[in-house]
Image: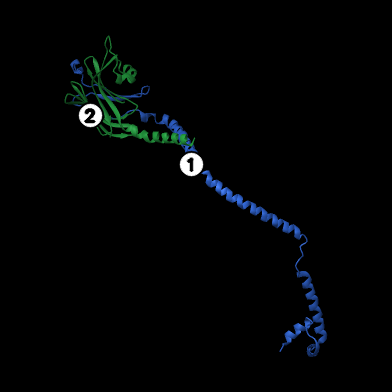
Amino acid sequence: MGRSLAFVISIGALMMSGAPALQAAETVWSGLVMAENVAQPQSIPPELTRIEGSLKRFFGYNQFQVIGQSEKVLKTGQEDWLATSKFFGLHVDARGESPGGYVLNLKLYKEKELLLETEAKLSKRSPLVIKGPQVGGGQLLLVLVVQ
Amino acid sequence: MKTFEEKWTAWLDDQLSGHELSEFEASLPDKAAAETEKAEARKLRELLKRELSAQPLTNEEFFSHQLREKITQKSRELPRAVAGQTATSRWWTIPRLLWAGSASLAVFLVFTVAVIHEKNPAEESQYLTQILNARVDPIVSPNATVAIFEVKQDRVTVLWTEGLQSLPADYAAK
């Protein structure tokens, strides 16, 4: 009985000590999304499934298509990356990790022209959606999710 | 050679005899007063002897019995105390330590869960993404504004821009 108890305690200790290490490397998905109203909407990309309801309610479109994306594994919380489409570029500069999430500096470019700049604390449990410019009959959205 | 005081003390104690006694009594200036004093001294001695003598114990047996009981009781308590010390040191064996460790861990987990549950409602906003600042290029989009919304149902934070430069549909290309 003493052995089993020691085993249980060891497992518990390992789980507790391993938890911060597991949190250290996380992936951030950044996407340039075109939202449109079409007669026959395509199914939503898997990265957006968890916020599909919010996107449809909030923006009033029935189709969401990814026109540019990037997946970045954050190890230090100081990385930077770019998600691009043919005309747009989203530059993300991670500026450190806090208990609530990552501090990110985001810049949306249309070709080489800076349209929008924002700084956000991206929570690991809470996606960020930015309403970009109107493009034709649709809307450009920028979406960031910690996976 | 005895002094007068020594002879006086010896006379009071009836220690003088023979020639020495008769010689001392002849030397006394007032023999009647001396005899009275001797009689009083004798009375005092008898009184002191009577009053200051040690009181005989009427229940000697009882006291010795009590004493023996005490000694027996003490000699019984001593091995028990030694045995108690041994038992205490034996208590912290490895199984006991494991039990104590697991009990402490359980208490810690209970408190941790309680604290987390208590903190969650107050710190809910901490788990939502926060917009720290936002800026739209005033030259490209002079009338643009920004607003922040939180959709708590899906924990989504929305940065809502209005008045950004509209672009033709070609810009939707991948």
Residue under pointer 1: B94
Tell me the distance, in whole angstroms, between the alpha carbons under discs 1 and 2: 54 Å
Q: Give the blue chain's letter.
A: B
Q: For this rendering, which residue is in front, B27 or A73?
A: A73
| Side (left or right) of B151 relative to B140 | right
Image marks 1 and 2: residues in contact by CB distance under 8 Å: no
Q: Quadrant of residue A13?
A: top left
Which quadrant is home to the C terminus of chain B?
top left
Q: Residues within 10 Å of mark 2 (few under 14, many from 20)?
A: some
Q: Residue furthest right?
A: B32
A104 with respect to B91 (left or right)? left
Asked where in the image residue B145 lies, by quadrant, the reply is top left
Numbered disc 1: secondary structure: helix
* Residue B111 showing in the rendered view: no
Residue A79 x, y percent position in the rendering: 25, 32
Q: Drawn colour of chain A?
A: green
Same subunit, tags 1 and 2: no
Residue for badge 2: A81
How far across and how far down the image is residue B65, in percent? 73, 56
Question: Which kind of residue does numbered mark 1 sit on?
Answer: Ile
Q: Is residue A54 above or below residue B82?
A: above
Marked residue chain, label 2: A
Q: Quadrant of the N terminus of chain B?
A: bottom right
In the orientation shown, which residue stands out farthest toward the left?
A112
Q: Which residue is at 48% across, 41% downward? A: B94
- Residue at 34% from the left image edge and 32% from the top image edge: A22
- Which of the 4 image quadrants contains residue B120? top left
